[in-house]
Amino acid sequence: MNTTATRYDAAFYVQALDRFVATGECAETDTEPLYAYLLSVMNDSMVKVQVLSDELCARIFYDTMIQFIQLNLDKEKYNFRKSQSERNEMKLVLEWSIAKRKDGWQALLQQISDKYRKYGFDSRFYRSHFGTEGGHADDEVWEKMVDDWEGAFQLKMHEEKEKEIAFRKDALERRLRSNLKDIPEYVRQNRVDKDEFFQTWGMMSGLWNTVDFERIRKIVRIQRSCPEIVKVARKMGRMADDEGREQIRVAEGNVYKMEHSSKCDILGISTGNDLNALLPIELAHSADSELEDLFVYKYLTRKLQTFRYKSEIMQPARRIETKPARPKGPMIVCLDTSGSMAGKPEKIAHSLLIRLLEIADRQRRNCFLIAFSVSIHPIDVRKERARLLEFFSKTACGDTDATRMLEATFRLLKGGREYMNADVLWISDFKIPHSSPAFMEEIRRCREAGTHFYGLQIGITDNEWTPFFDRIYRAGYIPSRNY
């Protein structure tokens, strides 16, 4: 089935905004509703002048539009999920038997026509064709009917998206104009440091109010009396050395990890679609013309019989290359939220997290938060800002266990290219019992593979984790005052 309506993912809009903020360049128009509206705003001469001439306005515009884009994409995703049953019905209709077509084509055409007549679905041709002797058995026309059905469905989705944008755009434009006027004025009048502004504003999801701004700003200002926060933030990510070059690991497909080539690696029999591990009987089926269809079906449904290896867990291949250093490495932040972190340690931790988030936003770096006590709360901080703000409203409590946090960390490091070259940061008082020897050994292996483990220890206590980290910074409690 053909898709007649254009759809873009979130990354497309982010790239368009990045290019516009950096250069002022953008297309004139587009057929996709959300992108077309975004272009209309970016082509406004007053907006362009403000964005290109003032760094604060550029950031305000960027975050305000990102919040609007995400809101519309979430609504589109919701509508798409609601319509999934109808899309599944289209696929099932394609598989109808000749007998079922004969009995059901009239009711089906009536159903589609009632819903999509205004979107160009013309049932008259199909009624006349299927009404002739054997017409319903014409596969080509039957498939064309389903294609037209999906085309009308996509047009309806397109129209609904236009209505959603029209419903929200007036409020957005008022907020954007207000933000571009009021925020720079407030920053100037209150002599807000630019770095403090960017960190504080980054937590507000494009929604401005002075009460929340000043509340978050107090947390940011903790950095003035806790310089270790700045040191840790600067360390995170693969940074260039003095000559501007470093060795970084680059993903090159996948490899099997064999302990020794002379040992048998076969552990048993499993099912899947790994063509490199097929049992001989499956290889024979693949070469048999009469069984080829069965082989393809089993491949697509991952039901081929395969050898299971001790080393079957695929690891991203890594090789060392000397390349120009990229100070934009991803970050995995593990934040202790147990009861011993309540109070001042929690404020210090939040201040560091806010600074890391601002760096991730400004440098377009991936940043993943794993808040942990015994259970964990994983948050992609750039994509899930609402969840992050909700997290900041909670108070540290509970016991401490690093097991689930380590499991989540290892999954991210081994899960593919996105976080394979990440630096890992623990923010904790480090009153954490050691995990199993297997996990401690896995930390060592990750470090050997190039992953850096850093820590910010808040408070003074014995730390048994030091040998497993590249460096642990230490921050004592800041002077007593209200934050």
Image: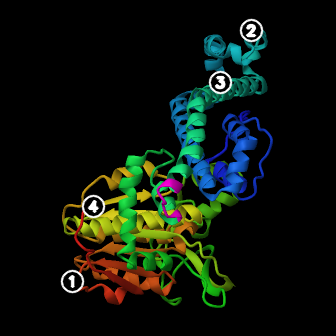
State the CA–CA distance, disc 1 to disc 3: 62 Å
Residue 372 placement, left or right of 380: left
Disc on res. 131: 2
Residue at image mark 3: 156
Which of pointers 4 and 2 lies earlier in the amino acid sequence? 2
Q: Quadrant of the C terminus?
A: bottom left
The amino acid beneath tag 4 is Ser
- Earlier in the chain: of badge 1 and badge 3, it is 3
Give the mark toward the camera: 4 or 2: 4
Q: Position of residue 448 (x, y in %)?
A: 48, 87
Asked if residue 354 is positioned above or below residue 171 in the image, the reply reads below
Measure how far apart labels 1 and 2 are at the Cα level.
Answer: 84 Å
Q: Which of the labelled discs sits on residue 118, or is there none? A: none
Q: Earlier in the sequence, mark 1 or mark 2?
A: 2
Whether residue 457 is situated above or below residue 74 in the rendered picture: below
- Corner quadrant of residue 7: top right
Q: In the depicted view, which residue is nearer to us: 351 or 357?
A: 351
Residue sitting at x 77%, y 23% = 141
**In which quadrant of the rendered image does the N terminus lie?**
top right
Which mark sits nearer the N-terminus, 4 or 3? 3
Q: How many marks?
A: 4
- Measuring from the top left, give residue 261's x and y in whole percent: 53, 88
Residues at circles 1 and 2 in contact by the CB criterion of under 8 Å: no
Circle 1 or circle 3, nearest the eye: 1
Residue holding disc 4: 375
Q: Earlier in the sequence, mark 2 or mark 3?
A: 2
The residue indicated by pointer 1 is: 461
Q: Report helix, strand or loop for mark 3.
A: helix
Q: What span is in magenta? A: 188-194
Residue at 36% across, 86% down: 468
Q: Does the stretch in magenta take in 192?
A: yes
